[in-house]
Amino acid sequence: MLFAAMNMPAFAIHTACDCLEDLWLKAREAKGARKRLFEHIRTITAYLVFPDWQTLMTTLINSKPPPEIEKRIAG
């Protein structure tokens, strides 16, 4: 019962993103299936902190972090 209750809002949010968010659609196209997109999000956010949604999605689309994050990585 709890699983169904939690699954419905997640499905609704994913559907809304598919309909309304251009960067989300471009990231899904770049990474393939939704499951792969979430694998990439989970992996990249384990190592990097992004200042906003746009920076995260742009990084996923281009498969390269933006210059300000790349500077932090280089140290």
Image (cartoon, rainbow, N blue to C red):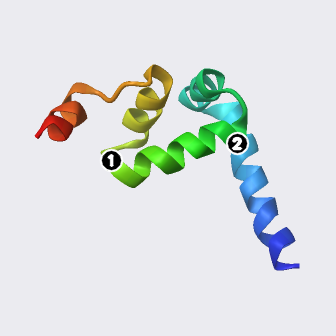
Q: Residue furthest left?
A: 75
Q: How far apart are labels 1 and 2 at the CA level?
A: 20 Å
Q: Label 2: few (<14), some or many (≥20) within 10 Å? A: few
> Quick check: marks 1 and 2 in contact, CB under 8 Å?
no
7 sits to left or right of 32 = right
Q: Report the front residue among 72 and 50.
A: 72
Q: Report the front residue among 17 and 72.
A: 72
Q: Label 1: few (<14), some or many (≥20) within 10 Å? A: some
9 sits to left or right of 53 = right
Residue 17 appears at what percent x and percent y? 66, 39
Position of residue 49 relative to residue 25, above or below, is: below
The residue shown at (44%, 24%) is 63
> Which label number is shown at residue 35?
2
Residue 55 appears at what percent x and percent y? 37, 34
Residue 65 appears at what percent x and percent y? 33, 29
Question: What secondary structure is found at the residue carrying circle 2?
Answer: helix
The residue shown at (48%, 47%) is 43
The residue shown at (65%, 38%) is 36
Q: Which residue is mark 1?
A: 48
Kindly identify the amino acid type of the residue bearing the numbered disc 2.
Lys
The residue shown at (76%, 69%) is 6
Kindly identify the amino acid type of the residue bearing the numbered disc 1.
Leu
